[in-house]
Structure formats: C-alpha cells, structure tokens
Image: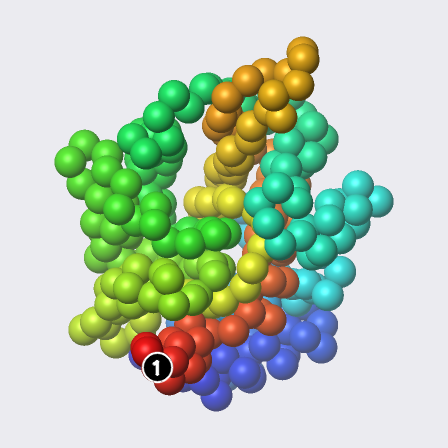
Amino acid sequence: MVLDNATVEKIKALVYQRPRNINEIALAIGKNWRTADRYVEEIKLRTGTIKSITFREGSRGSLKVVYWNNTEKIYSTDIQEKLFKQIELGVEKSDFSPFDIYQFVDTDKRRAYYELIEDESRYDYRIDTLAPYFKTAEKEISIFAGNLAFIHLEYKKKKILQYIQGCISRGVLVKIITNVNLVDLDNVETVLALNSGLKEPLVEIRHDIIPLRAYIFDSTIVKLGEIMSGQGKQGQLQGLLAVYYELRDEAWIDWMQKLFWKKFQSAVPANRRIENIKTLKKI
C-alpha cells in the first residue's frame, strides 16, 4: 500500500498528542502492525518529525514506541545551544569551524586530520574518504553544502553524482541544504533530474545559506570539513589547509540530525527558487 498524505498527517497528529506504540497507530489507521511500522519508518525518513525507540529489542516482548521529534529546541546542553546560535548567525564558511563541535566529542568517537593544499585547482578534497559512504548508505543521507560542485569530484573513475544515483537506485533518501542560485543552477537541476521516472522523489534540495559543510550518513557517522589559511604572520602555519573531521558519537549525530531538520524545514524548496531564477533576463 502506498502511503498517502492523509495517512501521514493522521499518524503525525496521533504522535504529536503523545507517544504511541505501533499497535495503537495500526488500530487508528485501520492497518496491520507491519504496514503501520513501515509507514512510521517512511515518515521518519521523509519528514524527520517523528522518531522511535524499541524496548527489549530482539525479545518476544519487544515494544516499539513512536514519539514526536521536537526540533523547536534542538539542544540539550548549554554547549549545543551556543553552537546552534553560532551556526544560525553564520553565512560564510569562515563564520563557523567544525572544530567547535569536534572538541566536545568523546575522543574514542571522533577522528580528524589535516593536510596542506599545494594546488587548489587540482585538489580532490579527499573524496576517497567520502565516496565509500555513499556506497554503503542504507536509508538516508543529509548534506549541508555551500554549492553542488562536489558532484563532479571523482573516485575510482566515477563522479559523486553517479554514487548519488546509486543511492537512489537502492531507495536511499538524499536531502541537501545548499545555496540554490544562478551560478549553481545547472548542478542543482542535474541532481534533481535523478528523480526522473520515480514514483516518489528520493532527492530533495532546499535553499539556505549556512556556514557548515557536512554529510550525515544514516545515523552512523558525520563527516565535516573546512578550508583555512594563515594570515602570513609570524608563527602561523602558512598556505592553504584542509581539515577533515569524523564523528561517531550517537548523541552528537542525533544533534546534527536535529540541526539539519530544523534548517531543512524552514528552507526554500529548490523548485521554487529555480522558477524565480529563470525569470532573470540576460542583457
């Protein structure tokens, strides 16, 4: 059975009132528990408004409870509140450093490294450490991007665009927040074209300007990066530096996902931006 919008809204309304188990939802929508469970998983991925937790998982008495994902307050600590406000106010990449997140993650659940960029025009942004996660993603990829030029980077003779296409063929949802503008229009339309022929779009792009550059793969890992340079002053590292971070801390991944959904829900759908961009006249 195809999940329609009316059923989506009914399930969301039920869960918004109070947490529900799968049997309660099944009874309310007139479906068996397997269908109700599938609907819940689909709504989780597509909207981010609900989440679930399973108690006594693996036993005959297991209980799955569905609850509302409150993105109005996405922070649970003063540190996360401060970081969120920094990201909210930022526009340029230089307005926020992923290191400000990295420093608070448990040392055994993080990894980072940096390198000097000798020729930026030929630099591959360590795509070899990113592309494999597109191949192994199972449910969802969320991306904070400044633009979509990264889709042309190559790994093992395949562009990232082809890896995203592979995700789509496996039914993986790909959601992107990026600056949808005239300059990057071709890239945006190229990515959206991956939805062609699908009953339901699996790639969704929305417009917002945010200083963060990050990839969230399922609920297992967050990959972040930044480019920095010294000011030529004594004692500073000289040249252009690329710094990469990996986070595997469940609590921080959950926070990053909430941050993504908070920004995604208020961002402008790409198609609306594209319609208006195409009213611009070249002179």
Amino acid tagged 1? Lys
Q: Residue furthest front?
A: 283
Residue at 46% of width from left, 19% of height from top?
Answer: 115
Q: Residue furthest bottom?
A: 6
Give above or below for 257 relative to 118: below
Q: Residues within 10 Å of mark 1 (few under 14, many from 20)?
A: few
- Residue farthest to the top? 235
Q: Closest to the observer: 99 or 27?
A: 99
Query: In the rendering, at what x and y percent does residue 167 appear?
Result: 28, 52
Give the farthest residue toward the left: 157
Q: Give the residue drawn at x 50%, y 21%.
A: 239
Task: Report how many numbered discs are placed on residues in the image.
Answer: 1
Toward the viewer: 59 or 215? 215
Q: Is residue 56 visible?
A: no
The answer to whether residue 227 shows anywhere in this view is yes
Question: Which quarter of the rendering shows the C terminus?
Answer: bottom left
Q: Can you say whether 44 is above or below 60 in the image?
A: below
Residue 137 image-quadrant placement: top left
Q: Quadrant location of the N terminus?
A: bottom left
Percent position (x, y) of residue 8? 49, 79
Q: Quadrant of residue 147?
A: bottom left
State the residue at coordinates (30%, 60%): 187
Residue drawn at x 51%, y 33% is: 227
Q: Is residue 49 above or below residue 107?
A: below
* Residue nearest the observer in this picture, 88 or 23: 88
Residue 201: where, in percent of width, then height? 32, 71
Q: Which residue is mark 1?
A: 281
Viewer-proximal residue among 42 and 193: 193
Q: Position of residue 250 (x, y in %)?
A: 60, 39
**Secondary-structure class at tag 1:** loop
Colouring method of the image? rainbow
